[in-house]
Image (spheres, grey):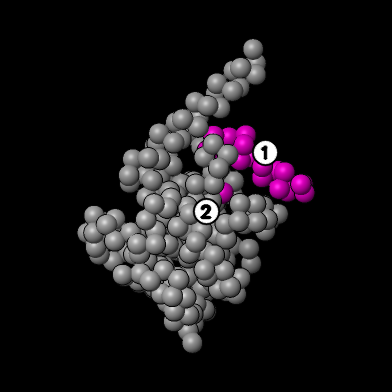
Amino acid sequence: MDAVIERIDQQVNGHPVVIYMKGTPQMPQCGFSMRAAQALGDTGVAFAYVNVLQDPEIFENLPRYADWPTFPQIYIDGELVGGCDITLELAASGELKPMMESAAAKQESASSQGAA
Amino acid sequence: MSRKARLQACLNTALTPMHLEVSDESHMHNVPEGAESHFKVLAVSEAFAGEKLIDRHRRVNALVRDELTDGLHALAIHAWTPQEWFDKGGGAAPASPECLGGSKQAS
């Protein structure tokens, strides 16, 4: 695995929820990124973000990581959920929050087992 | 042939949708006139039945792969079965967000 793919892999698997977006949740630089980050934020569950505009290497290589051509990309429990449209649909149907909560709980129990 | 016409032809053939809406939303973004860079698709097709959202989107992305590597920068996708579309009221695709300038950030 090359270095950048390994870095993405660590980010995606090291956090229950990660959004790769243009800008930040506070200062989004793209309307689709803004809406997706907003939907994640509205659940009240913590999430990590990567600003792809600040990381050209990830910007260039993320599309081939999960074979997904556009930004933003949202990963929950290590798996690509989709982009803005899917995230909004999952939020509207009420599925998003439980998905994020169960990913967060899973990671917490994994890390507490690791510490024991 | 415009990109819009190519997208329509390609999706019509592959999905035989009961309803298809392809909109060129490039004018909403900071790109030159005629850029054909930002599009939105609403495809209503039985072909999506039993398929997860991500797999529907992957299918649409794969169908238009050549466009995505040739100047198509953003593609909003709403891929529903006829029943889902009716349940949502059977109307137009949801409005896309305003541009916040991110695609020009690198320059």
Q: Which mark is residue B47?
A: none
Quarter holding residue B102:
bottom right
Please name the residue that numbered disc 1 is placed on.
Answer: A10
* Inter-mark Cα distance, 2 to 1: 18 Å
Residue B106 is situated, as x and y percent measured from the top left of the image, at 63, 63
x, y percentage for residue A90?
38, 46
User: In screen coordinates, is B49 left or right of B90?
Assistant: right
Q: Is B62 above or below relative to B55?
A: below
- In the image, is residue A82 above or below residue B41? above
Establish whether labels 2 and 1 are both on one chain.
yes
Amino acid of disc 1: Gln
Q: Which residues are magenta?
A: A1-20
Residue B94 at x, y percent in the picture: 32, 61
Q: Chain of mark 1?
A: A
Q: Quadrant of the C terminus of chain B?
A: bottom right
**Residue of label 2:** A72
Please name the residue shown 54% across and 56% down the image: A71
Residue A43 position by quadrant: top left
Place of residue A80 in the rendered image (x, y in percent of width and height, measured from the top left)? 54, 46
- Magenta-span inclusion, residue A10: yes
Q: Classify 10 Å Cα crowding around label 1: few (below 14), some (14-19), many (20 and above).
A: few
Q: Residue at x 50, y 32 (%)?
A: A103
| Label 2 Cα crowd, 10 Å radius (few <14 / some 14-19 / many 20+) | many
Identify which residue, B106 or A83, lies in the foreground.
Answer: A83
Considering the whole magenta stretch, tell me its main secondary structure: helix
Pinpoint the chain carrying mark 2: A
Q: Is residue B64 magenta?
A: no
Whether residue A1 is visible, yes or no, is yes
Secondary structure of residue under mark 2:
loop
Could one spot residue B94 in this view of the protein?
Answer: no
- Is B18 in front, or is A64? B18
Query: Is residue B74 placed above or below A25 in the rendered structure?
Result: below
